[in-house]
Amino acid sequence: MFASMLASNTTATGERKGNAMRLQQWLAGVLVLVLMGCQPDGDKLVITGSSTIAPLMAELAEQFEAQSGIQVDVQSGGSGRGISDARQGLADFGMVSRALKADEQDLTAHLIGRDGIAMIVNTANPVTALSDSQIVAIYTGEQKNWSALGGSDAPITVVHKADGRSTQELFLEHFGLNSDQVQPDLVIGENQQGIKAVASDGNAIGYVSIGTAIYEADAGAPLRLLPLSGVPAILESVDQGHYPLSRELNLVSQGELSEAAREWLDFITDPARAETYHDYYFLPVSR
């Protein structure tokens, strides 16, 4: 009987080992498929990053797919994600709505357009202009009520961008602030979240892409773009080089481009695409 029990236990142990090995093999296969799915391939382009650039790229992607048959997957998540994904090979291009930094020179920037960053308030707010020092006072919590700034006797709702967003980085740099100095009431990621926050709160102030703000205001959102340092927040100011908070719109890549990636760049920088850029209130940089 003991021999029979030993044989039975040995068989069960062998079955468990066999099952465990098969499970390990299955998990390894799934991991390979997942990793393959994250990598760009020759029949598909993956573009991730800036929420400012993403809507424009999504529109251009539809046009490109119809012409070339090459699928383009556009995902937002911030310029920081665009940098990271391009470096790791998770995307063919990262969308970055600023110039590359000194420690990002391992990447290649492909300039596609220009934009600016605008301070926005609700149209119900009577304030039509703020000085740089007043904006700093608002964002550091020194000034908490609109009444001292020509507005109603109401608390200011401070809307701030999350870390990893180029809009936030450029805002802080322009006003000489560190992130820990800002005292926000609401932290947002996507431009659309900032638009929604200010449009739904008559006492809110935020900052977003000029192009996005103009696009939404023209579509009926109750937004007012404030001048910056006395310069109107309009595309003409950006185009003429007068607007103090202008920025590059870039796609970034690492290493040699695939044929599909080169074809995509040629397509989106063709002067024939200028109208699409203008539809989203961006200034194109055509080849």
Image (cartoon, rainbow, N blue to C red):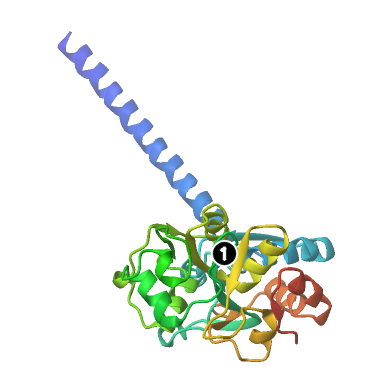
| Residue 169 seen in the figure | yes
Residue 101 image position (x, y, % from top left): 45, 84
Image quadrant in which the N terminus is located: top left
Which amino acid type is shown beneath numbered disc 1?
A: Ser
Residue at 51 percent across and 54 percent down: it is 201
Which residue, as the protein is rendered here, is positioned at the far left? 2
Front-lying residue, 204 or 146: 146
Residue at 67 percent across and 63 percent down: it is 217
Q: Which residue is mark 1?
A: 51
| Residue 250 seen in the figure | no
Image quadrant in which the C terminus is located: bottom right
Q: Is residue 179 left or right of residue 238?
A: left
Residue at 66 percent across and 74 percent down: it is 258
User: Above or below — where is 180 with respect to 106?
Assistant: above
Q: Quadrant of residue 108?
A: bottom right
Q: Is residue 254 left or right of residue 234?
A: left
Which residue, as the protein is rendered here, is positioned at the far top? 1
Residue at 31 percent across and 71 percent down: it is 142
Front-lying residue, 189 or 65: 189
